[in-house]
């Protein structure tokens, strides 16, 4: 995972403010990775490119490069060769991946990509039904001789895969609110329409189960020994 994590940090947090400030000249057609149809346009972001990490190292998945004026977004879909990843982003496995991803952001400083990296806050993003969909973190990033940037990391799970989002933009007091809106635009992409996967039905409460009519067992038959037979 070392090379993959280095590439992730370099792709997103190593981007210059100038690169983030302009949209790529040539967008690409939509691609499908692990059954996920990546939209060509989502929340104003245009899909520019995709990278196959899976080919050289199974488990590392795919990277999707999005941008819009003033913002850069990279999306990574991968499973780390796990056979099962819980659908709940608050589960221990997904939470642990979020924490590892958050630690990777801090590595941008010792690697020389940024002069300073610090965590502003952690937060979650819920869907309209108040279900948590993303575990997120907001960062402040500074580079020598350049304007400071805001970085945002969000992690979720979908269809037995981890999905990691990283956004950067020039620092602004409204950046977090804007990032939240951009992330909310991915909720219908992942959990509605063509990409939707059936949610597991919730277990019925004990009271509901008790209220259901119970089937009565037929009475046990008594064995009667026929006359003139020896029964044991």
Image (tube, grey):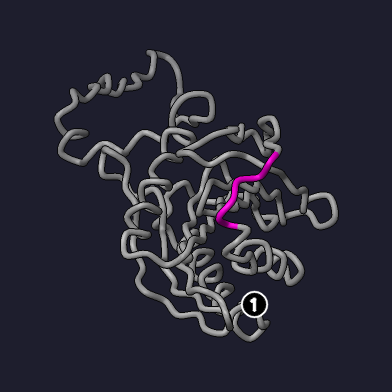
Q: In which quarter of the image is residue 191?
A: top left
Residue closest to the eye, 223 or 9: 9
Where is the C terminus found, in terms of image quarters?
A: top left
In the image, residue 217 above or below residue 24: above
Query: Which residue is drawn at the image coordinates 60% and 61% (left, top)?
Result: 18
In the image, residue 94 above or below residue 87: below
Q: Secondary structure of the magenta portion, mostly?
A: loop
Q: How many labels does the image show?
A: 1
Residue 164 part of the magenta-drawn span: no
Where is the N terminus found, in terms of image quarters?
A: bottom right
In the image, residue 21 above or below residue 95: above
Residue closest to the eye, 51 or 174: 174
Q: Quadrant of residue 32?
A: top right
In the image, residue 47 lies at what x, y percent?
62, 39
Would residue 230 appear left or right of 176 to someone viewing this image?
A: right
Chain part drawn in magenta: 20-25
Q: Can you name the residue that lies furthest to the top here?
A: 227
In the image, residue 26 lies at what x, y percent?
71, 37
Residue closest to the eye, 124 or 184: 184
Q: How crowded is mark 1: few (under 14 residues within 10 Å), some or many (20 or more)?
A: many
Residue closest to the eye, 207 or 112: 112
- Residue underneath mark 1: 113
In the image, residue 39 lies at what x, y percent?
57, 33
Q: Can you name the residue that lies furthest to the right here?
A: 56
Query: Which residue is drawn at the image coordinates 51% and 61% (left, top)?
Result: 168
Query: Could you tell me which secondary element the residue under label 1 belongs to?
Result: loop
Query: Which residue is drawn at the image coordinates 40% and 53% (left, top)?
Result: 179
In the image, residue 120 lies at what x, y percent?
37, 74
Residue 24 part of the magenta-drawn span: yes
Query: Which residue is drawn at the image coordinates 76% and 69% (left, top)?
Result: 3
């Amino acid at each position: 995972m070392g090379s993959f994590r280095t590439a992730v940090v370099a792709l997103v947090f190593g981007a210059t403010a100038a690169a983030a400030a302009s949209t790529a000249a040539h967008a690409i057609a939509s691609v499908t990775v692990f059954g996920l149809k990546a939209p060509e346009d989502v929340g104003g972001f245009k899909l520019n490119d995709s990278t196959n990490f899976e080919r050289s190292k199974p488990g590392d998945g795919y990277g999707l490069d999005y941008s819009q004026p003033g913002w850069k977004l990279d999306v990574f879909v991968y499973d780390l060769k796990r056979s099962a990843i819980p659908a709940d982003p608050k589960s221990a496995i997904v939470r642990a991946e979020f924490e590892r991803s958050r630690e990777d952001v801090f590595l941008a400083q010792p690697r020389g990509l940024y002069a300073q990296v610090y965590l502003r806050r952690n937060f979650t993003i819920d869907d309209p039904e108040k279900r948590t969909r993303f575990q997120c973190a907001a960062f402040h990033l500074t580079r020598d001789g350049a304007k400071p940037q805001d970085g945002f990391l969000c992690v979720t799970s979908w269809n037995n895969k981890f999905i990691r989002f990283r956004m950067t933009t020039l620092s602004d007091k409204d950046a977090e609110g804007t990032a939240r809106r951009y992330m909310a635009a991915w909720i219908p992409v992942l959990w509605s329409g063509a990409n939707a996967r059936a949610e597991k039905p919730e277990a019925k409460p004990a009271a509901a189960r008790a209220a259901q009519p119970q089937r009565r067992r037929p009475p046990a038959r008594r064995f009667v020994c026929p006359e003139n037979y020896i029964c044991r």
